[in-house]
Amino acid sequence: MQPWKELRPADSTGVLAIIAAVSTTDGRSYAYSFDRWLSDLYVVDGLK
C-alpha cells in the first residue's frame, strides 16, 4: 500500500484532526472535514 493523498487544509492553523474523508470510486475527487480550534488573546496594560 502507498499513501494516496496528504489531507491538510491550506491554512492548518488550529487544526486538531481530520474527522472524516471520502473519495469517489475513481479517486479523482475527495472531500474531508476537520476540527479547528481558534481563540483570542488579549493583552491588558496598566491594571492596578
Image (cartoon, rainbow, N blue to C red):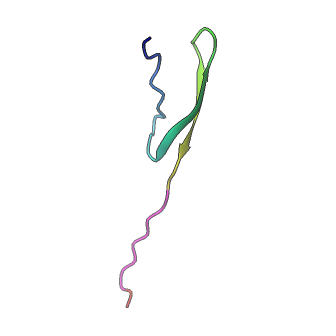
Quadrant of the rendering where the C terminus is positioned: bottom left
Front residue of 47/17: it is: 17
Residue 43 falls within the magenta-colored stretch: yes
Residue farthest toward the front in the current orientation of the protein: 1
Q: Position of residue 28 (x, y in %)?
A: 57, 12
The residue under the point 44% across, 45% down is 13
Q: Position of residue 9 (x, y in %)?
A: 48, 34
Chain part drawn in magenta: 39-46
Query: Against 34, is 39 above or below?
Result: below
Q: Position of residue 3 (x, y in %)?
A: 43, 17
Q: How many marks?
A: 0
Question: Toward which corner of the image does residue 46 lie, by quadrant?
Answer: bottom left
Is 32 positioned to the left or the right of 3 in the image? right
Residue farthest toward the top in the current orientation of the protein: 26
Residue farthest toward the bottom in the current orientation of the protein: 48
The residue under the point 44% across, 40% down is 12
The residue under the point 48% across, 28% down is 7
The residue under the point 43% across, 69% down is 42
Query: Against 40, is 44 above or below?
Result: below
Quadrant of the rendering where the N terminus is positioned: top left
**Predominant secondary structure in magenta?**
loop
Question: Toward which corner of the image does residue 47 lie, by quadrant?
Answer: bottom left
Query: Against 9, is 28 above or below?
Result: above
